[in-house]
Image (cartoon, rainbow, N blue to C red):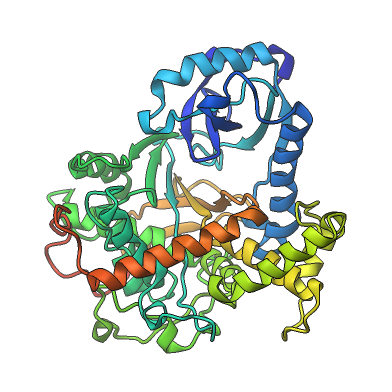
Amino acid sequence: MELDKMEENEWRYHGEGNKSLVLSHVQLSRVLRLLKYPAEDSENPPQTVEQAFRQIQNIVDFSSNVMSSLLGEKFIHSGEVVKLPLEFVRQLSIKVQNQRPAWRCDKVMDIYSGCALCLPNLTSPTLHQPTHTPPLCIEIKPKCGFLPSSKHVSKDIKTKVCRFCMHQHYKVANGKWKRRSLYCPLDLFSGNRQRMHFAIKHLIEEPQNNFKIFKGGQCIYSSKEGSDDSLDLNSLLHHLRPYFLYGNNRINSHMTSKAVLNDFIQVLVNALLSGGGGDGGGVTDSRGEGRSFCEASLFNRERIRHGSQGLPSDSVLFRILQTQMLDSLDIEGLYPLYRRVEQHLQDFPKERTRLQIDGPYDEDFLEKLQKCPTEDDGSVEYDVAKVHQYRVAMTAKDCSIMVALVPSSEEEEDDEGQRRLRDFLSSRPPAFSYSVSILDLDPKPFESIPRQLRLDQKIVSCYLRTGGALPKGSLPPLPGLFAAPERDDCMLLFHPV
């Protein structure tokens, strides 16, 4: 891209989160991520151009130097900071304003600094030459995949019911969502194919902010926050059916809806369990069996026929889970250490730089959190290392996984690092090149820790107060998409080509 010749008509609104707005190029597989700030600051930007540049550069450094080392370079796309013409940014802001969700408009796009993060567009991958069938991309926000076992946990319920499931009750009680999701992260992170299938099925039934499907770069399936609009499952099936024409459940060359969804989920499970090198061997991770089941999950443990296989050590889910588990103290055990660091910084303000509270996120920062002593020795270095570990774990708990699936013919050669997902029992199997990436790896601010403690207390007290029952006025879960029992076997497997 020639930054001095940017045309706003070549860019379109792609989506936004709490802190940034994303635009995608209509032809190139590129996105621009621009900062946002409160609408009341629209006339007076809250930070200088240099500060905006540093904020975005911190995101790049944190992703490339810290998270890349922990999660695996093959999954990470850190991008680069670019400086855009201000007039181009202003015109873009005007163009996309009416496409933004109303509930996001309490913040405005940064039109003063011209700084943006340029990244590959993972919803529209270029794994192969374009085919007549556009690529699919599935975005999953898996959330926290383990139960805490810290001695600092004050409420026993936290060791039995996962944070996500409790948070669902809190969100429904506060009107953020009309019905709760039956998805449980512990099922997805289990490595057991039945539980993973069960988890993804519930993500499809109630996507919320945790599940989206893109086709050719366009979002074809997602939830709108606060809306009780029913999801158009027939439309999704219409989009998915051409990708799975050669499954085993054909009826006069037409697959049943259940078969389409089953095959789609199996492909997704295989991609999540892969390490980029085939199916990989299962390894049992370090969690005890008691910490791998959530009491709020509707999955019946007795249905597991082959035990809990565990996650392959080179899979994306294993790497994310290991990074999440850097939060070994829970927020309740971490908060006193945060207070000690805060007091130290009040007494010695210049120490903020040496302790790298605000970065730079470099090899020294990574070394600080990796070489943290196992026991509390009372030093500020220990306190800071645990705080850094917690912040990194929070990023891993809030990241997104992008699974791109590109249909490819049997004659096409595989590119290095890409594998086929195939139904090897069928005479003409569907074949996909795939890639797995991790997004949303921003550093969590040091100052956000007190807010995390307050939120944790609200979520737990809400769950205990209701006894896990949903408040009046909430909508019941949607009728199950899979009326009949799921298939016993997993048809779609990795197969060397």
Q: Is residue 60 above or below residue 47?
A: below
Q: Residue at x 72, y 37 (%)?
A: 80
Q: Which quadrant holds residue 428?
A: bottom left
**Percent of width and height locating residue 392:** 64, 62
The tally of labels here is: 0
In-front residue for pair 398/43:
43
Q: Is residue 289 above or below residue 183?
A: below
Looking at the image, residue 196 sits to the left or right of residue 387; the answer is left
Looking at the image, residue 84 sits to the left or right of residue 412; the answer is right
Q: Which quadrant holds residue 365?
A: bottom right
Q: Residue at x 22, y 38 (%)?
A: 235
Quadrant of the image containing the N terminus: top right
Q: Residue at x 48, y 35 (%)?
A: 16
Q: Is residue 84 above or below residue 164?
A: above
**Percent of width and height locating residue 97:** 45, 20
**Percent of width and height locating residue 33:** 59, 33
In-front residue for pair 373/407:
373
**Percent of width and height locating residue 105:** 43, 28
Q: Is residue 472 above or below residue 10?
A: below
Looking at the image, residue 383 sits to the left or right of residue 324; the answer is right
User: Is any part of residue 185 visible from this angle?
Assistant: no
User: Is any part of residue 44 visible from this angle?
Assistant: yes
